[in-house]
Amino acid sequence: MHELTVTQNVLDIAIEHARQGGATRITRINLVIGEMSSIIDDSVQFYFDFISKGTMAEGAELQFRRIPAQFRCSECGQMFTPEGDDYRCPRCAGLGIVTDVGSEFYVESIEVD
Amino acid sequence: MEIEIKENIFNANDQLAADNKAKLDREAVLALNLMASPGAGKTSLILQSAKSLSDRLRLGVIEGDIASSIDADNVRSHGIPTELINTGGACHLDANMIQTPLAGIDLPSIDVLFIENVGNLVCPAEFNLGEHLKIVILSAAEGADKPYKYPLMFKVADAIVINKIDLMPYIDFRTGYFYDGVRALNQQAPVFELSAKTGEGVDAWASWLLEQWNERFGQGHGEPDTSR
């Protein structure tokens, strides 16, 4: 629901770093987004195409690397990605505990000319 | 050419949030970001907390709503200093939106600031406001599956409130299932079961709030001065 805010932030970050690097055009923006986030990729690209018009990032492609959430079993230590509402370990049925893998939300890099 | 960045997308918001927090810290005001579905009882919990804490902590409120001043008028009518933000459609509050109402509240005259976020279990979880504590309120009738459906919200919570426990005899709230989900996502957050309607369980919640204030501001500020 707040893809426009997110997209504006992505654009601002990309342009700031491109300028610092002396670039004139941004061709690609690589994002790392954990699955815990509710952001819709297509929606961000849609807004991006609109708000980047007339900027050095016009026409840039957004690349999303989605990271599945990783839970660690509190009994046996097994790492796993839960399915739906089952947070139990697939190996021993112990309760899984969420880790920070899956909460990523950052601009990794940009490709520029 | 590739330029490495590794910058959090919410960096700009987080910086404003840090400014807000510094301002609150200077005035020894404990800020809580109340997040819940529409109708879970955010406003009712504020009013019950005010009743329970009236002789111990002075409260202020920032009411965030997409439209209308219904909640703000209600809270104000109880004599609590209240600032309203109408987000005009936005699904969450962010650190920037808080700045104007924060300037409108006389911070030295309060100890605890409740920030009532827009009713929504998704977006508010992603935006820091400068609060000290994120509070998630779930009303029992919404169902026990909410941690599984909105994992980020329950992961970021500093405390979780189950409201409307007076309805428990009439609904099938799967308590074990709920607590499994909460504990998988969040090992630390205390869970308060209460009814903002009957007042049951509110004292434990209010005592915890007082502890939170004392932990941060008790030293050097003494007891909150309710005479001002």
Image (tube, grey):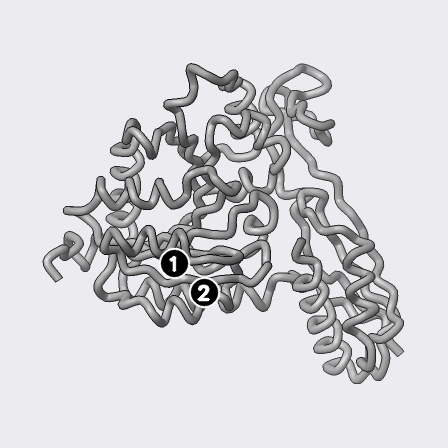
**Residue at x 29%, y 54% (from the top left corner):** B112
Mark nearest the camera among 1 and 2 is: 1
**Residue at x 41%, y 31% (from the top left corner):** B163
* Residue position marked by numbered label 2 in the rendering: B98
On the rendered structure, is A2 left or right of B216? right
* Residue position marked by numbered label 1 in the rendering: B62
The one nearer the camera, A64 or B129, is: B129
Quarter residue A90 falls in: top right
Distance in Å between CA atoms under marks 1 and 2? 8 Å
Q: Residue B75: horizontal and vertical position, in percent?
A: 32, 52
Residue A99 numbered mark, or none? none
Quarter residue B167 falls in: top left
Quadrant housing the C terminus of chain A: bottom right
* Chain under callout 2: B
Callout 1, which amino acid? Ile
Quarter residue B164 falls in: top left
Q: Residue B151: horizontal and vertical position, in percent?
A: 61, 37
Dot 1: what SS? strand
- Can residue B217 be spotted in the picture? no
* Chain under callout 1: B
Callout 2, which amino acid? Ile
Above or below residue A16? Residue A84 is above
Q: Residue B15: horizontal and vertical position, in percent?
A: 52, 67
On the rendered structure, is B34 left or right of A98? left
The one nearer the camera, B143 or B136, is: B143
**Residue at x 51%, y 58% (from the top left corner):** B67
Q: Residue B106: horizontal and vertical position, in percent?
A: 27, 68
